[in-house]
Structure formats: C-alpha cells, structure tokens
Image (tube, helix red, strand yellow):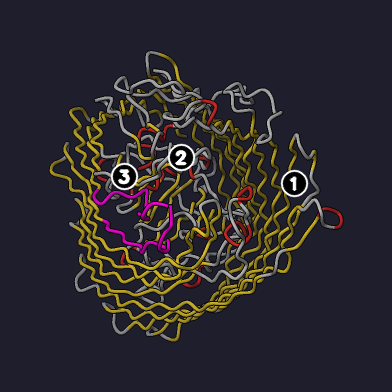
Amino acid sequence: MSNINTRILRFGRNGIGAGIALALATTVARAQDPAVFNLGEIDVTAPNDSQNQTTDNGAALGATTITNQQMYEFDLNTLDQAATLAPSVVQSSSGNARNESVLFVRGFNRYQVPLSIDGVRIYLPYDDNLDFAQFLTADISEVQIAKGYVSVLDGPGAIGGAINLVSRKPQKAIEGEIREGTEFGDGQFLGASTNLYLGTRQPNWYLSGSANLVQLNGFPLSESFTPTDSQGPGLRDHSETLNASGSAHFGFTPNATDEYSINFVKQVGQKDAPFQTDLPVTSQKNWTWPYWNVQNIYFLSNTAIGDSSYVKTRLYYSRFDNALYAYNPDGLFDLQTFKGAFQSFYHDYGIGGSVEAGTNFGKFDTLKGTLQYRRDDHQAYEWAPTTGVQPQTVDLTDTYTVALENTVHINRQLDFVLGTAYNWRDTPEAQYYSSTAPGNIAYYATNKLGAPDGQGALIWRYSDSDTLSANISSRERFPTMWELYSAEFGNALPNPTLQPERATNYQITWSRKFGSTGDVSAAVFYSDVQNLIEGVELSPSLVQNQNVGTGYFVGAEASGSYQLRDDLSIGGNVSFIRRHVDDPQGTGATLPTYEPTGVPFAEGFLYVTWSPLHNLNLTPSVQIADSRWTENETGPTYYYYQTGAYHLVNFIGSYQFDNHFTLQAGVKNLLDQNYALSDGYPEAGRTFFLKGRLVF
C-alpha cells in the first residue's frame, strides 16, 4: 500500500464476539470497569422513582450497554467488533471498493442508526458513509446501543436504533492503564496495538487523557481459500490500515449535582481497499485513503435547579477530513494518468448545540424537553488528470429539533412514557462542478423537509428481579446530500425532492435477574418501514434514488449468563431477523429482483468460562450464523445470492498476576474457516493474539 508507513492491526476481521452475552460480569468478577462519564450518555426515559434520576430504563426498553471490561476480555478493539456483543447487532462489510465495516441493528443500516461520542453525533455531511472499524474502544467506558426505541430527546434520524460511545471518567487521585498487544497469523507477525490512559480525580475537578494506536500489516486468509488472479494465498492484499486516536477531558464539579466538562477527541485513520477476488486486476478500483480523520471539541454541562429540576447543555464543533485517491487500474498504486483516476478531498464541519431541561412533579410525573440545532458544511474539491483541479463546492444543511418526553410513574412498579418531537431540515445551498457554468459552479434545487416523531412505552417491574415492557416508536430519517444530489459519475439522476424515510417499531421485552449469579432477557419486535430510499432504474445506464421502498423487519432475540459455580460460568445469545422490502424496480427493468443484504436470518453465540486456578480464566466459545444476501459483482448478469454462513470456534485464556497486571492470549477462527460476508470479499482465517494490561 501506498501511504501507510506504520502498519496497523485491526482485529475485527475474524468476526469473533458477534452476539456475546452482555452479562459477562460473572466471568470477570476480579476486574473493575472504568467509571462512566455520565454527561456523555444518551437519554433514556425517566426512572421509576422520579427522585432518583440515575435509574436507567434503557435496558427495559431493549437497550444494551457493553462495558470496557467486556470489550477487553474478548479482545474487541474497534467499534464494529464491540457493538456485536449486543444481540440483533450484525457486523458486515460494505462489499465494495470502499472497504468499510458496517453495522446493522435489528436489520437497520448505518444511515438509520446514528453514531455519537458522548452524545455528540458523528455525522459525515455528504454521504454519512461511516466505517465503524475506524473507532477504537480502549479508552471508552461503555458502548450504549438503543434498539428500536430511541428517546426523542436524542435528536432526529434514529429510525432503527442508536449507538453512543461514552468516555472514561477518573475516580482516583491518580489512575492509569497501559495495554500492549500483538497478533500473528499465517506463520508471521501481523501487527501490534498500544493503548495509554491517565487520569486524576480531585475534590472539585477531574482531568484525563488517552492515546491509542492499532497497527495492521493485513489479515491472513484461510488456507482453504482458492487463489485467483487478483488475490493469492496468505495475507489479504491491500488490507493494511492505520488507526490512532487521542482524547482529553477536563471537568469541574463544584458540588454533588452540577458538572461542567470540556472535551477533545480525535481519530486518525489510513487504509487501503482489498480487491474483489473474482474480478481481474484491470477491472478493479485501485483506491486508497491517505487520511480519514474525525475530530470533536465539545462542552457538556448539567446544572441542578432546586431538588427536582435540571438543565443540561451541549455545544460542539466537529470536523471530518477525508481524502480518496484512485490510481490506474494495474494494481501498482503509483500512477494517476487514466481517465478514471482522481484525488478527492472532503473538509467538512458540523457546529451546533442543545438545551435539555427536566423537572419532577412530585413523585408521580417527570417532564423533559429539548431544543437542538446543527449546521453541517460539506466542502469538497477534486483533481483529475483530464480536468486538473476543480473548484471547491459547498453544501449546507441546517437541522432543528424540538422534543418533549413525559413519564407518569403510576406506582413504583409501573411507568407510562410518551414522547413527541418535530424535526426540520433545510438545505440552503447545494453546489456541484460544471464545466459550462460561470466559475464552473452550478446549483441544485434546495430541499426543505419537516417530519414528526412519536413514541410511547409501558414499563412494568412486577418484582424486584423481573421487568416486562411494551413500546412503540415512529421515527424519521432525512436523506443525505449524496442521496439527494449524487450523479454517481454520470450513472445516476439527482432527486432533490426526496422525502424522509420512516419506521414504526413495535417491541415487547422481558428480563429477569438471578441475584448476583446471572440474568436472562428476551424481546420480540416488528418494524413497519415506509418511504425507504432505493435506486430505481430509469434506463439500463441510469438510476435515481426514490422513496419507493416499503416492507417490514420482524424478529426475536434472547440472551443470558449464569454462574454455575465459583469456577464455572456460561452465557450466550441468539437472534432471528427476517426482512422484506418490496422490489423498487418497474416492469422491464434489467436490475435483479431486490433483496436486503448484509443480515443473516439467525445468529447465535455460546461461551463457557472455567477458572481452574484462582487467577486463571479459560474461555472457549462458538459463534454461528446462517447465510445472508449479497449481490454478484462480476457480471455480465447481476443477481442476488446467499453467502456468509459460518461456525467460528475461538479460545481465550487470561492470567491475572496481581491487582495490576494481566496477561491474555487467544486464537480466533480456530478451525480456519473460509467464508465471505459479501461477494468476493473473504474474511480472515485463523489468527493468534497476545496482550498484556497494567492498571494502576
């Protein structure tokens, strides 16, 4: 690869960890999770006791929280791996030259499940093509995942769920952590990772910082992989990546209730794009990303007003800088002389804020409300050998939200929640390059949209250990700038009249705790999806995005863990999801009959942890999934088929020498299974890892 001098290791190619049970505390009882930065958590409904604003209804509504310790215990170092600890969350690949790791939450894709860091939305203003493998997790206290029901207080767009990364917060006068890891495969060293964290907690303030680096030379293919003209045996060609991140957090806590925090988070990435293994090299897109960077600066606050009210504020400035280089189609990544070669640069920013206020009316009612505003500015320019440097174009969007949520505490066992919101999105400017326009800048028609959200939930805690809930949530998602205006290199017709997508989610959940020895939970869900944005064929060489997709997602999930005895625990989960979306193509279309891709019907995970010695944990596990739809990319006839069924066996062992140092080793995909989640993009074969952690 072209630009990566330091090789980095991304561990997520093996797929281990998808669906690991959430309640792993019983298997790692000797370890402690870092303290949670509560200001950075996304909203849940009001607690059953309105005098106790820390009680969380999120789990009762189907949400999942994945802790730092769980991510460490299963060697899950990036968000795409960690999120799959939750049932009904599926990791897949983008299945094209973009080389992106994507997540589905109960069948909904990355555009329909917003990502946040400490409650600040990570949104790429043009296409929102997030690569979840770019986000590192070592310095994250927890990953919150809302499924189906997302509070209207969290802003627009969450029609299928939401994911939030919550920072660590120091609890001791001096605390820190150092992690070092290496990975091996195909008889060679693959790369290494380094994670550093340091923090201090004082009576009225706290300060913390972190730095992370993950290195990858590439990942090994299974020995069962059959080499092709574009991919040989051994390491996956062009799979190098570099991911680094750093953060700093300062907080002021003048009393027991108030908190004010200034935060800085930056993530830096570089990556190549492996070839589709069935296409010749001359038909591949020779793409590379010399940088893929996200930066957030934000202020968060919580101020108590009397004994029963509060005000929270959130102000932020976000940047996204991205470069994509396309080289001549020869696999050499050195020249850019062909017509299809280019250098594309994005320099985007988002600026905004929100105010949330809440109050308790006695012990029987809690009312919350929020006002939110965000401006996104997409600035892009391109160089090509045929046109030279094109002028910079600008796209602007303004998004507004007003929301209310009310919780009636009918009694200490029963809550009734209602939420409503209205969202506006205005696109005051949308430019594009035109060689015939004055100054080579032309303008698309602007787009103004508005849409309501509504939801309700009934939560019944019918015993100290049992909870039953039912909820319904109807949410919208505005189209991205890409969906509105992209011409796809002349293969698509822009559609500035696109309307929001909408999903109405129905859910019933149940959970039981077995004291300190374990728990179990289950959910059934149904989603009615309307106005989905799909590409419709206008002619054999031209498509257009239109609101033609309607259908449903239906499924069920269950998870649990149990401490059988002091030295033995088990856990796991299973999920089933069936998706149906009407074919958007008209009569006579040459495109294949549409099938929703990326999500298997069934997926499951089972693990056992045995502690033959006091400080030794041995954890074998098995992960299974049936096939998922993918689209053939080689032509000349394009069609959908099913691929990606797997049964992965993994093993992890760890030894805790004392309260400070732990050594861990493991093997992933022990049987070296050869499988692919997308057409022509095989996953990793057998790999080994070794890592140590020092905590003080």
State the CA–CA distance, disc 1 to disc 3: 38 Å
Residue contact at pointers 1 and 3, CB within 8 angstroms:
no
Highlighted range, magenta = 577-602
The residue that disc 2 covers is 78
How far across and down, in percent of the image, does residue 533 sit? Answer: 48, 63
How far across and down, in percent of the image, does residue 165 sit? Answer: 49, 51
Q: Is residue 264 visible?
A: no
Q: Residue, x 78% and y 40% (percent of image)?
A: 387
The residue that disc 1 covers is 381
Q: Nearer the viewer, residue 415 or 191?
A: 191
Is residue 571 placed above or below 446 in the rendered structure? above
Residue 493 figure quarter? bottom right
Residue 64 figure quarter? bottom left
Q: Crowding at label 1, few (<14), some or many (≥20) Cα neighbours within 10 Å?
A: some
Is residue 230 placed above or below 531 in the rendered structure? above
Q: Crowding at label 2, few (<14), some or many (≥20) Cα neighbours within 10 Å?
A: many
Side of 461 where 184 appears, left or right = right
Which secondary structure is most common in the magenta stretch? loop
